[in-house]
């Protein structure tokens, strides 16, 4: 990714905006980093207008990292991408680390660093060892991590020592994707194999279940977890995580309004976030017919 940005190239079929890239290789030493750079050197243009910058050690979040990144960005105003690999190295360990409040707070702190700058901050973290039908549930940490960011990439290897993997991209405001990938050891990069097109109609099933839910009551209010439970009562085979449900409702609110006349609102209290669903019912009154016309008032 950093190489594609620095030369204005592409990642698979997706073109990159040219600019500087900063890669914080915090799990590496200079020797390992140089070995990987040598493998991808045929794809790097050392004479390009922009460049990829590297660091193997930085300060922690809340203890100098913001100042370091701000200083770098002020000196390299054309930066388009910052990669932090891995996120754990920049976090201050404390009693709130790993909790929803702690994870959300750290994501907000990182968001403030790049506020008003046109660039992407990519955080690398680990996945859980146990499997899950919903890839978003594989992210190590609380739901605050995925809930506070604009998008999530989840890379799942078929076998630990294998070369095949699936990449799930779940974004808040743009289209989501799933790709089949294969790792090329010679060039040290993931190769695109195919885009995975879902065979089920999970979203349409969700819409129908919401429709059924509001057939029973014209309004519904509760947390995403409560809504998941209510939908599973209507269809025990339907399974989706609360965070995926919230993301889907946010990104498809207009579709639900126009297709199903379902209004979706999100509110929050000091302790929780709530989803409010209501049926947009149009009350129609019929006036007395005059000369064959029928007036509708709604």
Image (cartoon, helix red, strand yellow):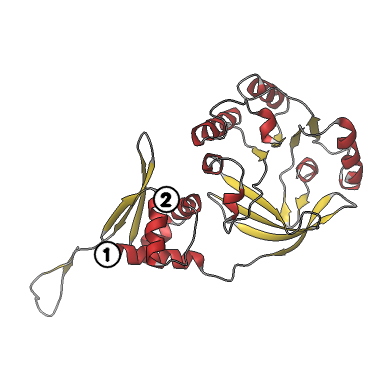
Q: Residue at x 57, y 50 (%)?
A: 137
- Near mark 2 (Cα within 10 A), the count class, few <14, some 14-19 or many ≥20, is some
Name above or below for residue 133 compared with residue 222.
below
Name above or below for residue 123 compared with residue 155.
above
Q: Residue furthest front?
A: 130
**Residue 149 location (% of width, % of height):** 56, 41
Quadrant occupied by the C terminus? bottom left
Query: Does residue 202 appear left or right of residue 76 in this picture?
Result: left
**Residue 272 location (% of width, % of height):** 39, 40
Q: Which residue is mark 1?
A: 216
Nearer to the camera, 5 or 219:
219
Q: Nearer the viewer, mark 1 or mark 2?
A: 2
* Secondary structure of residue under mark 2: helix
Q: Which residue is mark 2?
A: 225
Disc assigned to residue 201: none
Q: CA distance from mark 1 to mark 2?
A: 19 Å
Q: Residue at x 74, y 42 (%)?
A: 18
Query: Does residue 128 appear left or right of residue 229 in this picture?
Result: right
Considering only order in the chain, which callout, 2 or 1, is on the residue closer to the N terminus?
1
**Residue 49 location (% of width, % of height):** 81, 36
Q: Residue at x 31, y 50 (%)?
A: 221
Query: Does residue 100 appear left or right of residue 138 in this picture?
Result: left
**Residue 167 location (% of width, % of height):** 68, 55
- Near mark 1 (Cα within 10 A), the count class, few <14, some 14-19 or many ≥20, is few
Q: Residue furthest bottom?
A: 292
């Amino acid at each position: 990714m950093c190489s594609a940005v620095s030369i204005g190239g592409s990642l698979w079929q997706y073109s990159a905006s040219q600019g500087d890239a900063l890669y914080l290789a915090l799990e590496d030493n200079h020797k390992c980093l140089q070995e990987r750079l040598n493998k991808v050197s045929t794809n790097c243009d050392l004479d390009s207008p922009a460049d990829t910058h590297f660091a193997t050690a930085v300060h922690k979040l809340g203890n100098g990292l913001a100042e370091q990144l701000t200083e770098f960005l002020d000196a390299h105003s054309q930066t388009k991408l910052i990669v932090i690999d891995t996120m754990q190295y920049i976090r201050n360990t404390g009693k709130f680390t790993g909790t929803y409040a702690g994870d959300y707070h750290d994501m907000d702190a990182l968001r403030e660093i790049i506020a008003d700058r046109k660039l992407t901050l990519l955080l690398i973290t680990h996945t859980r060892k146990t499997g899950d039908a919903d890839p978003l549930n594989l992210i190590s940490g609380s739901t605050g991590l995925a809930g506070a960011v604009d998008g999530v990439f989840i890379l799942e290897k078929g076998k630990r020592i294998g070369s095949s993997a699936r990449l799930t991209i779940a974004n808040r405001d743009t289209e989501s994707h799933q790709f089949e990938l294969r790792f090329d050891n010679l060039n040290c990069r993931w190769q695109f194999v195919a885009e995975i097109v879902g065979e089920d109609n999970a979203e349409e099933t969700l819409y129908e279940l919401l429709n059924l839910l509001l057939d029973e009551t014209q309004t519904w209010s509760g947390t995403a977890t409560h809504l998941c439970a209510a939908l599973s009562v209507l269809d025990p085979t339907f399974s989706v995580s609360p965070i995926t449900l919230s993301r889907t409702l946010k990104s498809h609110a207009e579709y639900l309004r126009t297709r199903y006349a379902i209004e979706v609102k999100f509110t929050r209290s000091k302790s929780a976030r709530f989803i409010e669903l209501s049926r947009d019912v149009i009350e129609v009154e019929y006036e007395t017919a005059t000369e064959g016309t029928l007036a509708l008032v709604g």
